[in-house]
Image (cartoon, rainbow, N blue to C red):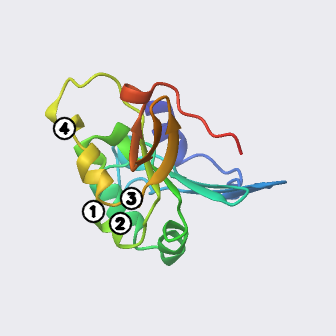
């Protein structure tokens, strides 16, 4: 981080575009700027992925203040309105939750990438489930609608698109 901060004043190269388009894949990347934020969590990338007809958003380690700053951007609000799968920021912890995001985002499914519960701030599944409409999953016991999936409970999570 110190090296990055040292480059802020001396770097003169061009900045890569904040979007990448490959056949069948559309990527849009946003971030907060330094020095508006100095902590690494709120400098995380906010990434939107469109793969075929499924739209994902990955919030990195964004926390509520970072989300609120990004929500000022109408383009981000519009992209959030199209999201099918919301990957919860900061591993689904309470500090990464921003209720205002869900004024725009109505996902079918929330994904939380997290390990065993060590802190009460990790108990956010029900909160996130209140914002999702649900997705039908086939399990060993039949079919069930799920609103939240976690690596803690479900193991590796992948899509075959």
Q: Residue at x 42, y 53 (%)?
A: 34
Q: Earlier in the sequence, mark 4 or mark 2?
A: 2
**Circle nearer the viewer, 2 or 3:** 3
Q: Residue at x 52, y 75 (%)?
A: 78
Q: Residue at x 70, y 50 (%)?
A: 13
The answer to whether the residue labelled 3 contacts the one labelled 4, judged by CB atoms less than 8 Å apart, is no
Left or right: 117 as drawn, with respect to 72: left
Which residue position holds label 2?
102
Which residue position holds label 1?
99
Which residue position holds label 3?
132
Within-10-Å neighbours for mark 3: few <14, some 14–19, many 20+: many
Within-10-Å neighbours for mark 1: few <14, some 14–19, many 20+: some
| Distance of label 2 from label 3 (alpha carbons) | 9 Å
Which residue is situated farthest in the right direction here? Answer: 23
Residue 109, position as x, y percentages in the image: 45, 52
- Disc 2 element: helix
Residue 33, position as x, y percentages in the image: 45, 57
Which residue is situated farthest in the left direction here? Answer: 120
Q: Nearer the viewer, residue 63 or 146?
A: 146
Q: Nearer the viewer, residue 100 or 7?
A: 100
Q: Earlier in the sequence, mark 1 or mark 3?
A: 1
Q: Which mark is residue 121?
A: 4
- Disc 4 element: helix
Q: Nearer the viewer, residue 134 or 7?
A: 134
Q: Earlier in the sequence, mark 3 or mark 4?
A: 4
Does 54 sit above or below residue 69? above
């Amino acid at each position: 981080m110190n090296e990055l901060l040292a480059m802020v004043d001396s770097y003169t190269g061009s900045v890569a575009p904040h979007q990448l388009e490959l056949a069948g894949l559309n990527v849009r990347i946003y971030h907060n700027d330094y020095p508006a934020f100095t902590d690494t969590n709120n400098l995380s990338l906010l990434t939107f992925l469109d793969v075929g007809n499924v739209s994902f958003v990955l919030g990195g380690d964004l926390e509520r203040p970072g989300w609120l700053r990004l929500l000022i951007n109408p383009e981000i609000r519009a992209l959030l309105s199209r999201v099918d799968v919301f990957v919860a920021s900061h591993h689904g912890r309470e500090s990464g939750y921003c209720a205002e995001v869900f004024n725009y985002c109505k996902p079918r499914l929330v994904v939380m990438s997290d390990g065993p519960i060590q802190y009460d701030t990790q108990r956010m599944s029900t909160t996130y489930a209140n914002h999702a409409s649900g997705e039908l999953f086939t399990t060993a016991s039949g079919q069930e609608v799920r609103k939240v999936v976690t690596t803690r409970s479900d193991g590796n999570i992948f899509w075959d698109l």
